[in-house]
Image: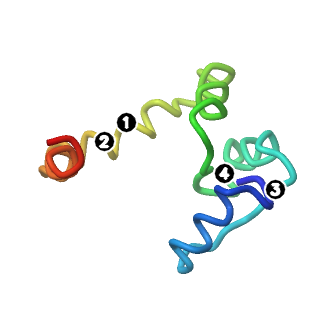
């Protein structure tokens, strides 16, 4: 995540147990993700969409969808949906 952003503060405040790494730009965080030196990037939709559009060979969609399939299969997705979208 980009240093000093609301994303950075949110992760630090909400999930203090997660080791965070800050970058001077989202582009640098994407490069680190692609190289395998970090596990994930927390960003807004427009940044993620641009990343997916510019890196179709990275199979990001599969990596993003896999956990969704898991939570749909075990009922977690329905529970979240029912709670927030009755």
In this rendering, the label closer to the viewer, 3 or 1: 3
Label 4 SS: loop
Q: Determine which quarter of the picture holds residue 11.
A: bottom right
Reading the image, the residue beneath label 3 is 23
Q: Residue at x 13, y 51 (%)?
A: 74
Label 3 SS: loop
Q: Residues within 10 Å of mark 4 (few under 14, many from 20)?
A: few
**Can you say which quadrant of the picture contains the N terminus?**
bottom right
Reading the image, the residue beneath label 4 is 36
Q: Determine which quarter of the picture holds residue 21.
A: bottom right
Label 2 SS: helix
Reading the image, the residue beneath label 1 is 65
- Front residue of 25/81: it is 81
Q: Residue at x 59, y 64 (%)?
A: 10
Q: Residues within 10 Å of mark 1 (few under 14, many from 20)?
A: few
Q: Given contact means CB atoms under 8 Å apart, are the residues at marks 1 and 2 in contact? A: yes
Q: CA distance from mark 1 to mark 4?
A: 19 Å
Return the x and y of residue 59 as percentages of the image width and height.
52, 30
Q: How is the image coloured?
A: rainbow
Reading the image, the residue beneath label 2 is 68
């Amino acid at each position: 995540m980009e240093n000093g952003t609301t994303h950075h503060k949110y992760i630090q405040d909400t999930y203090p147990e997660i080791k965070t790494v800050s970058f001077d730009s989202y582009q640098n965080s994407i490069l680190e993700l692609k190289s395998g030196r970090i596990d994930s990037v927390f960003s807004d939709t427009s940044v993620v969409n641009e990343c997916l559009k510019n890196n179709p060979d990275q199979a990001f969609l599969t990596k993003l969808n896999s956990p969704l399939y898991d939570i749909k299969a075990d009922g977690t997705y329905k529970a979240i949906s029912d709670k927030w979208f009755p």
